[in-house]
Amino acid sequence: MTTEDEYQELIHCIHFGDTAQACGFKVKAKTKEEVMEHAKLHEKEAHGKELSPEDEKMIKSNIKTVKA
């Protein structure tokens, strides 16, 4: 069982190298929602486009929860 203190030490991350995007972008954040916001911003600024619904689904499925 995970204690409240252990939950506070968890973060969420994505490495685009582990996805079909494969550009090497990495981000860590406190919430999955923050990870997605960073991913959307990266896609727009670095690649000049919006994430497609398929890309969003793929990224969300690849977000990992790790200890901080």
Image (tube, rainbow, N blue to C red):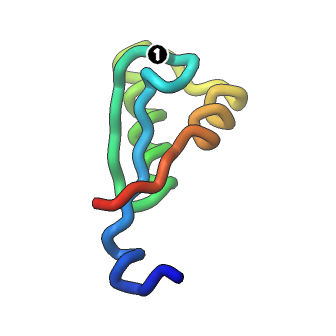
Density class for disc 1 (Cα within 10 Å; few <14, some 14-19, many ≥20) is few
Quadrant for the C terminus, please.
Answer: bottom left
Name the residue at 41% across, 32% down: 15
Quadrant housing residue 46? top left
Disc count in the image?
1
Name the residue at 43% across, 21% down: 17
Name the residue at 44% across, 38% down: 14
Name the residue at 62% across, 34% down: 56
Q: Is residue 17 above or below residue 7?
A: above
Q: Which residue is mark 1?
A: 22
* Foreground pick, 64 / 2: 2
Asked whether, in this view, residue 61 is left or right of residue 43, the answer is right
Which amino acid type is marked by label 1? Answer: Ala
- Callout 1: SS: loop
Quadrant housing residue 7? bottom left
Q: Is residue 13 above or below residue 47?
A: below
Indicate the position of residue 50 as horizontal and vertical percent values. Answer: 55, 24
> Which residue is most to the bottom?
4
> Which residue is most to the right?
54
Asked whether, in this view, residue 23 is left or right of residue 9, the answer is right
* Foreground pick, 40 / 32: 32
Indicate the position of residue 40 as horizontal and vertical percent values. Answer: 47, 34
Q: Is residue 36 above or below residue 67?
A: above
> Which residue is most to the front?
1
